[in-house]
Image (cartoon, grey):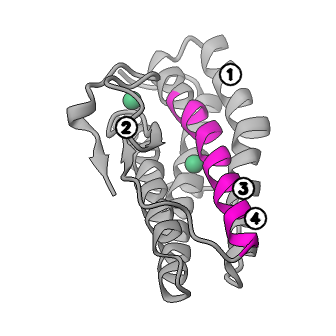
Amino acid sequence: MAVNNAMTADFLRSAYGGESMAHMRYLIWGEEANKNGFPNIGRLFNAVANAEWVHARNHFNVLKDGIGDNSVVAGAVFGNTDIVQNLQGAIDGELHEVKQMYPVYLETAKFQVEKGAERSFHYALEAEKIHAELFKNAQEKAKSGADIGSDKIYVCPVCGYTEIGDKVQQCPVCGAKKEMFRNF
Ligand SMILES: [Fe+2]
Ligand SMILES: [Fe+2]
């Protein structure tokens, strides 16, 4: 399914760029969390990094017929200080996606009847809402010097839905079976 509208294509490329950088940033912050004695927050960063990879892959594949060079303008968060600040960066990035970026991208895709982009943006928006909450909870723990618990963290490989512990048997966003989920 080709993308027919320039604005939706631009939004897909920008979202791909943003997700790609989020993926890398979370791997870096995960390594930092591990080094500083927060291995479970480190796992959370690694799990969410995988979810952002799922989003980047989905956006990239919607654009798969558009071979060629493009400059990509995308939101990026920088900084690598202490765990509480790194988690604040993560929360800010997720909330930007939830409140500003994906709602606008999603409405544009709907308006332009771009079904592939609509699905990809919907999956990302729903997962980022959860990521924001997971990072807020982790930051509350980190503020008191504590790590999060050791429950497994699961990521849906189709939409990036993320959960701590065994809550669902089927992905509530895309319907994928729990057996497909990756765990961290
Ligand atoms: Fe996210
Ligand atoms: Fe899913």
Kindly tell me whether residue 136 is visible in this rendering.
yes
Q: Position of residue 55 (x, y in %)?
A: 46, 43
* Amino acid at dot 2: Asp
Whether residue 63 is situated above or below residue 152 in the rendered picture: above
Residue behind label 1 places its C-beta within 8 angstroms of ligand 1: no
Specify few, some or many for label 4: CA neighbours under 10 Å numbering under 14, 14-19, or 20 or more.
some
Left/right of residue 133 with respect to residue 40 in the rendered view: right
View extreme (left): residue: 179
Residue occupying the point 77% across, 56% down: 92
Specify few, some or many for label 3: CA neighbours under 10 Å numbering under 14, 14-19, or 20 or more.
many
Residue occupying the point 60% across, 56% down: 72
* Amino acid at dot 1: Thr
Residue occupying the point 42% across, 61% down: 150
Left/right of residue 182 with respect to residue 44 in the rendered view: left
* Amino acid at dot 4: Gln
Q: Earlier in the sequence, mark 3 or mark 1?
A: 3
Left/right of residue 120 with respect to residue 126 in the rendered view: left
Whether residue 5 is situated above or below residue 40 in the rendered picture: above
